[in-house]
């Protein structure tokens, strides 16, 4: 008697990316709101977060430079493989952050 294992495929892994974007290092990284790093603190170590802050991509959806941590949390992010990001191209990231106004 053997145990049967049913193989299921994950849509994000079988779906072909619409864009394959190169990741590059930046000399002076953009300042990120704390919400992007706070969500990753329990999952990724602080050194890795610091290294990822120094990387960026040219986002094909916004036609602008976007920090990798923003790209990583974008709904269109599929996977990162060997210095590239696979993007589904469905929804752009929420970048740049809107400045908060204090008109009181």
Image (cartoon, rainbow, N blue to C red):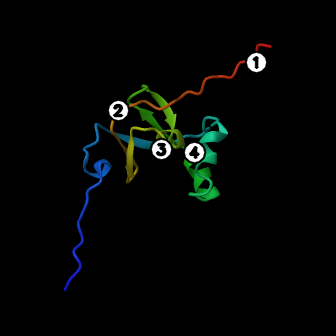
Distance Cα–Cα, label 1 vs label 4:
30 Å
| Residue 87, quarter of picture | top left
Q: Quadrant of the N terminus?
A: bottom left
- Which residue lies under the disc numbered 3? 72
Q: Nearer the viewer, mark 3 or mark 2?
A: 2
Q: Which residue is outermost to the top?
A: 103
Q: Nearer the viewer, mark 4 or mark 3?
A: 3
Dot 2 falls on a residue whose secondary structure is: loop
Image side of residue 88 versus residue 92, left or right: left
Identify the disc placed on residue 54: 4
Asked if residue 71 is positioned above or below residue 51 in the image, the reply reads above
Label located before the other in sequence (1 or 4): 4
**What residue is drawn where x is 62% and y is 54%?**
41
Q: Nearer the viewer, mark 1 or mark 4?
A: 1
- Which residue lies under the disc numbered 2? 90
Label located before the other in sequence (4 or 3): 4
Image coordinates of residue 84 in percent, x first then y, are 38, 47
Q: Which residue is outermost to the left?
A: 1
Image side of residue 31 versus residue 22, left or right: right
């Amino acid at each position: 008697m053997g145990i049967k294992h049913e193989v299921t495929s994950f849509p994000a892994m079988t779906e072909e990316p619409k864009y394959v974007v190169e990741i590059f290092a930046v000399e002076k990284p953009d300042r990120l709101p704390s919400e992007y790093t706070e969500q990753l603190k329990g999952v990724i170590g602080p050194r890795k977060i610091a290294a990822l802050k120094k990387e960026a991509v040219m986002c094909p959806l916004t036609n602008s430079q976007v920090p990798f941590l923003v790209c990583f949390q974008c709904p269109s992010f599929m996977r990162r493989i060997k210095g590239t990001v696979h993007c589904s191209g469905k929804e752009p990231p929420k970048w740049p952050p809107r400045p908060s106004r204090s008109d009181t």
